[in-house]
Amino acid sequence: MMESGIQLENIKIDSSWKEVLKDEFLSPYFAEIKQHYLKAKSQGAILYPPAKLLFNAFNLTPFDKVKVVLLGQDPYHQPNQAMGLSFSVPYGVRIPPSLQNIYKELQADLGIPPSKSGDLSHWAREGVLLLNSILSVEGGKPASHQHFGWQHFTDAVIAQINAHCNGIVFLLWGNYAKAKKALIDTNKHFVLEAAHPSPLARSGFLGCRHFSKTNEILLSLGKTPIHWNLD
């Protein structure tokens, strides 16, 4: 993605998204994102996730396969954690506290035991777009790339889904994600809101039953439900 030039062929992303987001990739603001990214890299900053995984969410969940959007804020900022999917960490990496709470809720809601892995790639392949609002971060510095312009890009992603898809379930956990509700037409889509799963939210997330509610909505629309079991 971050090679010289901004030609579409240099952006490693599923072809369906490349077409949908073509105008975004060719826009002046996206050129600014690239400049910020390259400047940080040239100054020796350690950036997460690895460049090849910046658009991992889009590669694992093609545009026409999206059923659910699970919105996060920005990538994990510690080594080996960020993998381009909101809330997900690679296999073998210690499961972060927020994801531990997600697993607790999944077990309480659907009886699915917590996975020993924090890798949510299976959900992505099931049609859950695991989208962070900010797609990159500097190591050890949470929200350090919030000024790059990524939010403009990911708001455009939500706008495209809102305009061209039908019956999408948006899971908005925490105030940051809830602020995106303004981008969503609730006459054609479904919004489920809860507290953030972080333990800092005092467990207000637990009991939301969003996994079963999501599948009930999908079934009511004649869509295949999400297979939430990761193991």
Image (spheres, helix red, strand yellow):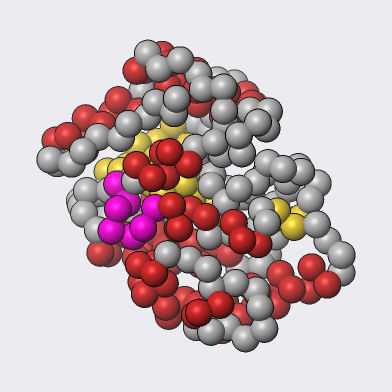
Of 107 and 156, which appears nearest the observer? 107
Judged left or right of residue 140, residue 19 is left
Classify residue 98 as left or right of residue 64: right
Determine the image quadrant of residue 90.
top right
- Check the image and report above or below for 85 versus 164: above
Which of the 4 image quadrants contains residue 39?
Answer: bottom right
Query: What is the span of residues highlighted in magenta in the rendered image?
Result: 61-67
Frontmost residue, 32 versus 16: 16
Q: Position of residue 227 (x, y in %)?
A: 32, 31
Farthest right residue? 44
Q: Is residue 141 left or right of residue 185?
A: right
Answer above or below: position of 44 versus 93: below
Residue at 22 percent of width and 48 percent of height: 167
The percent position of residue 204, horizontal first and vertical second, equals 51, 22
State the image coordinates of residue 128 (x, y, percent, origin top left): 38, 44
Q: In the rendered view of the protein, which quadrant contains the N terminus? A: bottom right
x%, y% of residue 68? Answer: 34, 44
Residue 177 in view, yes or no: no
Residue 63 within the magenta-colored segment of the rendering? yes
